[in-house]
Image: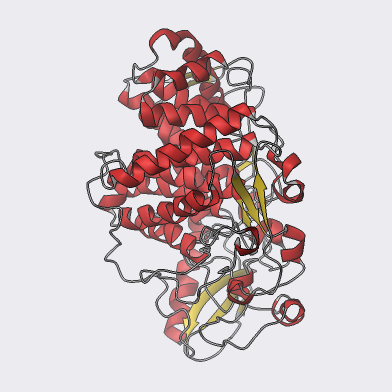
Amino acid sequence: IAMGLLVVLVLAAMAQVAYCAGGGTTQNYREALAKSILFLEAQRSGVLPASQRVGWRSNSGLQDGKANGVDLTGGYYDAGDNVKFGLPMAFTVTMMSWSVLEYGGQMQAAGELGNALEAIKWGTDYFVKAHPEPSVLYGEVIHGDTDHFCWQRPEEMTTSRQAYRLDPQRPGSDLAGETAAAMAAASLVFRRSNPGYANLLLQHSKQMFDFADKFRGRYDASIPVARKYYQSVSGYSDELLWAAAWLFQATDDRRYLDYLANNADAMGGTGWSTAMFSWDIKYAGVQVLAAKILLQGRAGAHAAVLQRYRQKADFFVCASLGKQGYGNVKRTPGGLLYHMQWNNLQYVTSGSFLLAAYSDSLAAARQAAVWCPAGPASPAQIMAFAKSQVDYILGSNPRATSYMVGYGFIYPLEAHHRGASIVSFQSNPSFVACKAGYAIWYPRKGSNPNLLDGAIVGGPDENDNFVDDRNNYQQTEAPTYNNAPFMGVLARLAAGGRLDRSIPDGLDNQTSVAPSLSAGNNLPNIMAFKIQFSNRVFVIFTAQSERRLTLDSSPCARRSRRSRCARV
């Protein structure tokens, strides 16, 4: 154990010195890619498959939809609770699909394509169930307040699992539009390997788009219980454009391109200038997709309109890279893009993916640069900046902390997550009552009993500070939509460049041959303990007990730029 402590301390000190000296740390993007996909398995609802690798999870939500006369088992819990919110789940599936469409070749090279396809299909199988009629879509399972009243493992929820739906009398163009986009993008993923399933997804996508466009309205007006958690601030116009863009990609039907072009001004596609891309605000994604269509020479008579979309995509790049002048995205002292306090990393992962995908599209079209007010940004510079954001998340930052659970030497141990924070149902099936979870497990100090491997938490504040505390949900909760776009950019970086993007036949049911990254998480003799070194916390695993060691000297304490060496 003493030798293990010495190794961790030396490596940690080296990482901190390297950062303070302006040096870099080599990241294992392949490992991070594998873990980013693995996290989605911890979020699964329903009957878990034989291929399930996260061993501390079991079946859950088996009565979902029963009270409504429909089968709503399956799908994903959005984050650290046990709610199935339709809008963020659909965005998660869209971005997983786009990640595979852009970088499926790289995922295959890393041995992770099969796992990525399983993750996508777990979501689309649920959406097929949630769309039982052309103009009906179930958009949420369980009231968020009801769920948050309890702190329980998903395997033994005692709360009502009421489902909420959209229909012509209760429209939701944003939710239906995003779900249509998810199904269209996923149909492209499975087109070669499972054409029958791809056609099914495309049929659902077309029906949902028609429903969204014909019966217009915000989903949180029809499902008001969602407003407190996932309010549709941007409205539904961006989702309608987003869905049309994906349906054009999936069908090559000019009607959808006509929709994208003819509604560009009225729906804000060529009016919004934004450097934020998220489950709510899709404009930047629409603009990059439209720019890609233009660069591929597929715009036809709509080239002028798509050029205006491209100008907005260029704004996203310039503002992200600090070359726009007005509208530049704020950065932390350590260089991280900073949008807001609550779960800032969702914008960093989605933004990094857009930058990577657009950079590669520009390079493929032999475009020299994006011409920003403060100077040009070449495809290589755009990709390098996306890489810098990925590296920050993985540990190249003032705290030398990885914000992906389970990756690196220092990472969050107290993620705000019901299932991870309570002893595994597999290890101890003794019932944990609704309020008992809050009394016993929620306030418990120390590492979560189960490792939420691969989860990307909310991340640091505007000064690079981070408090690893289960109650600090703004920084320690990990939603699925943090990981979905990150999969793509990690695959790109793992391969070091672009490969053949085609999705080979027969891979939709293939799983990775790599051993489970969760293996051993529940072994009773394995315990994690923290080492505190100059106000830094390090994690190491031992078969003994938890220990704490405090040393005084800081490799950054004597440097003048203290902001680069933020204290814990």
In the image, taking residue 62 as reference, residue 224 lies left or right, namely right
- Image vertical order of residue 286 relative to residue 264, above or below: below
Name the spot of residue 108 as percent of width and height, x first.
27, 51
Locate residue 470: give its quadrant.
bottom right
In the image, taking residue 123 as reference, residue 168 lies left or right, namely right
Q: Is residue 387 visible?
A: yes
Q: Quadrant of the N terminus?
A: bottom left
Name the spot of residue 346 as percent of width and height, x first.
59, 47
- Image vertical order of residue 234 relative to residue 480, above or below: above
Q: Quadrant of the C terminus?
A: bottom right
**Figure coloring:** secondary structure
Instruction: Please give the name of the residue rendered at 28% of the width and 39% of the height, measured from the top-left corner.
Output: 501
In the image, taking residue 147 as reference, residue 355 lies left or right, namely left
Q: Nearer the viewer, residue 400 or 18?
A: 400
- Image vertical order of residue 564 relative to residue 301, above or below: below
Instruction: Please give the name of the residue rendered at 30% of the width and 62% of the height, measured from the top-left corner.
Output: 511
Q: Nearer the viewer, residue 127 or 432?
A: 127
Furthest residue toward left: 505
Q: Is residue 283 visible?
A: no
Name the spot of residue 107 as percent of width and height, x first.
32, 50
- Image vertical order of residue 459 relative to residue 537, above or below: above
Q: Nearer the viewer, residue 349 or 531?
A: 349
Name the spot of residue 242 as percent of width and height, x first.
53, 30
